[in-house]
């Protein structure tokens, strides 16, 4: 239509199916853990089942997903016969055996059938299936795949599958160029064409916190700065807001590093109050996470919606040292004569025009991109997010064998779970949630659900693209600190509590100052746990025994309702 233009896409054909199946595997695993059978909700009429020719023709006309190859290819099938324990199926594109293809009873015991009341539209769950007939009836259209042995690949049986109700997205891109090497916008394109990577607006939750910390680090704070982790109450038009940590515990004065590693909500709110939400908003907008961030403290915890595509491209700027990245799905466009009419990467490479280079010398690429963050701030954040992977909220699910940084995110009631992470050359992110947001359950978390998706993809990406140490800016001066207290340690200190922290050259860090975000507190109020002090018995002046409570503190005195 355009005179022979050639468009070169950025997607890596080797990595795309890996990304698709990494996400699909987690979605299906969660769905089967729920134990609810929905099937395809399509059926064939009895007249279509009279012959093999008829049911194959009827099956071919149905719109059911045929683009899923999780573990093995998924096929549409129709239930032809329901026996005492098994069900015989006819499978599209698969020849009939002499004995037929069967779904055995042992394949259905994980599920209960979801029944829909046609009059009210309500749903109810039946008992746990014992035989195939508890889930399927004659004429039901289902999806099936071959179950094979992990060791030999030998066929075991046909097994029922279904498209999960829960959805999600995955994006991976080059941290220097923004080239998208893999993108998966849901479980199956033929099931739903909605691209959740670019179109779904979701709450990023704690995965937004690095932008709060970035604004603080650029405002004079350091990874060793102490912020109070203690209860907060904020009056809002909707009532009193009392943010909490996921653990429902408070940990007192804590360094910034530990705050991001353990994803402490109260520290983040206090820090956002200290820095100012207008400043935090300007950072989020500069990185392209939002066009306009509302300056309310709840948004410091990622309550305003954005897309996975925007979050991953923003994290790429942490990974590359703070230079702007413009994500793209198109590398280059050439006309029919081979002339380039569009090229995404605008960096300068004079050496690339040379016919040869001295042995061992790589082409020198000159970056002319806008700097959106100080390189020291970018490295400090990267170092802190390495702690998230090494000992924080992602430690159980992410281990690539190369330096890796990232941040988990879990929203209120676990309606959305996130993980966005990066090596020195590839950044990738995942979110999982229902299209109509509702809780994923009390056990759902970004590290537990999206961490494995990232791990499966990036373990293959590291083999192909490699990975190395993050570049340290020349302006970094390293000082050992205690990551629990923020105290300065000697140069030869060692142990699990010791972290070599990067500080800006020429800026002598001041240790021991504590920030509380302006939320004033009595000096003797407990910062960590409310501990009940036992009552005691005393002897009065008359010789009698009396029970008295603990010694009163400022927090127990009343102002008589004056304030």
Image (spheres, rainbow, N blue to C red):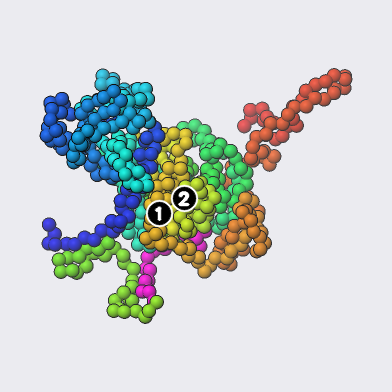
**Mark 1–mark 2 CB contact (< 8 Å):** yes
Residue at figure coordinates x 40%, y 34% from the top left = 33
Q: x, y percentage for residue 103?
A: 28, 32
Residue 410, picture quadrant: top left
Look at mark 2 in the image and give the residue it sits on.
398
Q: Earlier in the sequence, mark 1 or mark 2?
A: 2
Q: Residues within 10 Å of mark 1 (few under 14, many from 20)?
A: many
Q: What secondary structure do most residues of the magenta stretch adopt?
A: loop
Q: Is residue 399 above or below residue 94?
A: below
Which residue position is annotated with label 1?
458
Residue that lies at the very extreme toward the bottom in this rendered image: 358
Structural distance between the alpha carbons of marks 1 and 2: 9 Å
> In terms of secondary structure, where does tag 1 sit?
helix
Task: Estimate the x, y position of residue 315 in percent, counting from the top left.
Answer: 42, 54
Residue 197: say if magenta: no
- Mark 2 crowdedness (10 Å alpha carbons): few <14, some 14-19, many ≥20: many
Which residue range is magenta in the image?
361-380
Residue shown at 62%/47% (left/top)? 253
Q: Quadrant of residue 334?
A: bottom left
Residue 24 percent location from the top left of the image: 34, 43
Position of 477 with respect to 103 (left or right) is: right
Q: Position of residue 372 (x, y in %)?
A: 42, 60
């Amino acid at each position: 239509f355009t005179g022979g233009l050639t468009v070169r896409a950025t997607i890596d054909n080797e990595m795309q199916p890996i990304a698709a199946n990494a996400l699909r595997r987690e979605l299906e695993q969660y769905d089967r853990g729920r134990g609810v059978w929905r099937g395809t909700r399509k059926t064939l009429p009895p007249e279509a089942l009279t012959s093999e020719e008829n049911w194959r023709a009827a099956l071919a006309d149905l719109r059911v997903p045929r683009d899923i190859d999780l573990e093995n290819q998924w096929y549409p099938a129709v239930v032809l016969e329901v026996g005492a324990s098994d069900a015989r199926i006819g499978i599209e594109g698969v020849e009939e055996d002499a004995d037929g293809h069967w779904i055995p009873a042992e394949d259905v015991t994980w599920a209960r059938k979801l029944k829909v009341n046609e009059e009210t539209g309500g749903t109810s769950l039946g008992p746990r299936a014992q035989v195939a007939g508890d889930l399927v009836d004659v004429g039901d259209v289902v999806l099936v795949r071959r179950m094979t042995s992990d060791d030999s690949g030998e066929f075991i049986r046909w097994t029922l599958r279904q498209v999960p109700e829960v959805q999600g997205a995955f994006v991976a891109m080059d941290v220097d160029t923004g080239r998208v090497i893999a993108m998966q916008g849901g479980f199956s394109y033929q099931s739903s064409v909605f691209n959740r990577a670019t179109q779904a607006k979701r709450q990023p939750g704690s995965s937004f916190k690095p932008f709060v910390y970035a604004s603080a680090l650029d405002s004079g704070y350091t990874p060793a700065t102490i912020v109070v982790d203690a209860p907060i109450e904020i009056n809002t038009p909707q009532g009193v807001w009392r943010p909490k940590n996921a653990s429902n515990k408070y940990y007192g004065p804590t360094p910034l590093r530990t705050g991001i590693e353990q994803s402490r909500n109260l520290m983040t709110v206090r820090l956002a109050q200290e820095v100012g939400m207008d400043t935090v908003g300007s950072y989020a907008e500069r990185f392209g996470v939002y066009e306009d961030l509302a300056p309310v403290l709840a948004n410091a915890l990622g309550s305003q919606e954005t897309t996975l595509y925007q979050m991953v491209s923003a994290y790429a700027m942490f990974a590359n040292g703070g230079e702007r990245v413009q994500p793209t799905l198109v590398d280059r466009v050439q006309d029919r004569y081979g002339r380039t009419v569009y090229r995404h990467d605008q960096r300068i490479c004079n050496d690339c025009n040379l016919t040869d280079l001295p042995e061992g010398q790589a082409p020198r690429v000159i970056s002319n991109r806008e700097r959106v963050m100080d390189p020291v701030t970018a490295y400090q954040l990267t170092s802190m997010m390495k702690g998230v992977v090494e000992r924080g909220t992602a430690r159980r699910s992410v281990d690539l064998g190369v330096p890796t940084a990232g941040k988990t995110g879990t929203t209120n009631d676990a309606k959305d779970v996130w993980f966005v992470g990066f090596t020195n050359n590839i950044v990738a992110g995942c979110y999982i949630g229902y299209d109509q947001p509702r809780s994923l359950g009390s056990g759902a978390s970004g590290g537990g659900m999206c961490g494995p998706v990232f791990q499966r993809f990036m373990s293959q990406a590291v083999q192909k693209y490699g990975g190395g140490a993050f570049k340290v800016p020349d302006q970094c001066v390293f000082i050992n600190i205690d990551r629990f207290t923020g105290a300065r340690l000697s140069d030869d200190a060692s142990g699990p509590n010791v972290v070599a922290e990067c500080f800006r050259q020429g800026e002598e860090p001041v240790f021991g100052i504590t920030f509380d975000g302006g939320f004033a507190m009595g000096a003797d109020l407990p910062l960590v746990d409310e501990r009940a002090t036992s009552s005691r018995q005393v002897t009065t002046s008359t010789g009698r025994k009396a029970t008295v409570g603990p010694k009163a503190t400022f927090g127990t005195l009343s102002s008589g309702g004056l304030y």
